[in-house]
Image (cartoon, rainbow, N blue to C red):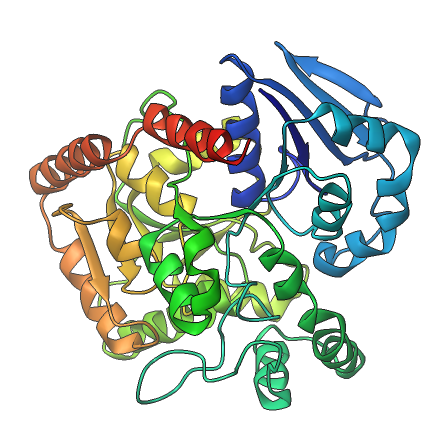
Amino acid sequence: MNILVLSELFHPHGSGAELATFLYADMLSRTDCNVKVVTNRFGDEPSSSKIGSLEIYRIPLLGEAIDTKYSILRRSDVLITDSIRKMIKWSDVVYVPRFWFSAILAAKALRKPVVAHVHDYIPVCPLATLHEKSKSTGRCDCSIFHCSAKCIYEFEKLRGRRAGETVASLALNFSVGRVLPKLVGLSDAVICVSRAQRDIIAEKEPWLRRKLHVLYNPFLMGTDTSMTGKDFGYFGGRDSLKGFVLLCKALLHRRASGSEQIHVQATKLRNSEPKFEEMLEKLGFIPYSRLDAAQFKAVYRQIQTVLVPSIWGEPWPYVVVEALTQRRLLVASKIGGIPEQVEGCEGAFLFEPGDERQLMETIEMAKSLSKDQVNDFGMRNKEVFLQRFNNESSIRKFIRICEQLT
């Protein structure tokens, strides 16, 4: 089977979604499938390369753009070039794993089946986050194609955007944003990364239900990182949706109550502002910028408990997978796909999303455990997770989905 992957970003660029795309492409190329990837070219990267039998082609797509969700659509002209058309014709299935939704139109024009992969809530929310919540249901009240101005404004305010950026977001999400879910709906199959994500999309848009498939993201299984410290770890940076503000409030409550200070090893938090650095230090953060693999491993050794205080429904966060497979305790929000990931893991402690006092109490509970208890919980976390999820099962199901379309 020939599979063409059209992804505006490809690992090591991007984040968890791009890592999943890379793992799928790599694992598929190790089967009987022939896999080609087209992605953006950064800096002095080669225009083409191979990893084993996996072929990667890089072309200028994004420039200096930050918002890939919309900037990639401006390069729809690439899809009608002879080289891309030849690749689409070569393929048996076109795989669109992120935001290059105009590629779905190009593939359908050439009568090729398309598998779209959603790592957020883009089919039912232009913002992709379901940020604006209903007090009664805990779900987003905005209807598809009609993300409210209030929702967008609150979202951008939460992200710390300036007035001009907020206006631009309103304009894009009220115009182009309404088209994106329709483009996703043109695909032949839509992969969701958790049952929780699938159920939300199916509930809000029942017409998509027959196309939805749940397929858990593959993951890297590196060597265990030994645990030498007792610190907590947080890897969401200053992103409010990742729970940074919530975590700061919880640590502030601990400090005000006179509790012994904890240390939180935190990535993507280095800042040149002295007041910000001082605030972090007072709350117990040990901030870093982005770390390479060796640096990250050294920091992870100091971490006993991983904190995931997200306030948006992350469908399948890799930070949770890493904590469980690395035998760490986990303190996380009971939201999105997280409860599904940690089912049966006794060393995973969940709290109600957005509740800083409950977060503080859960941190205290994790802190009170002895070293033997931590090691025991960590071992069981890993065993339970690996009994429930594995890469071989994911790749077999991916191939079955593709075979059903050809």
Q: Nearer the viewer, residue 180 or 276?
A: 180
Residue at 33 percent across and 59 percent down: it is 196
Position in image of residue 367 (x %, y %): 18, 55
Classify 359 as above or below 105: below
How many numbered badges does the structure rendering display? 0
Classify 76 as above or below 380: below
Position in image of residue 376 (x %, y %): 9, 36
Q: Is residue 127 left or right of residue 109?
A: left
Q: Please say whether residue 89 is visible from this viewpoint.
A: yes
Q: Nearer the viewer, residue 166 or 59?
A: 59
Dividing the picture into quadrants, the one containing residue 54 is top right
Position of the C terminus, as image quadrant, is top right
Dividing the picture into quadrants, the one containing residue 139 is bottom left
Position of the N terminus, as image quadrant, is top right
Position in image of residue 11 (x %, y %): 62, 33
Q: Please say whether residue 228 is visible from this viewpoint.
A: no
Q: Is residue 86 left or right of residue 201?
A: right
Classify 139 as above or below 5: below
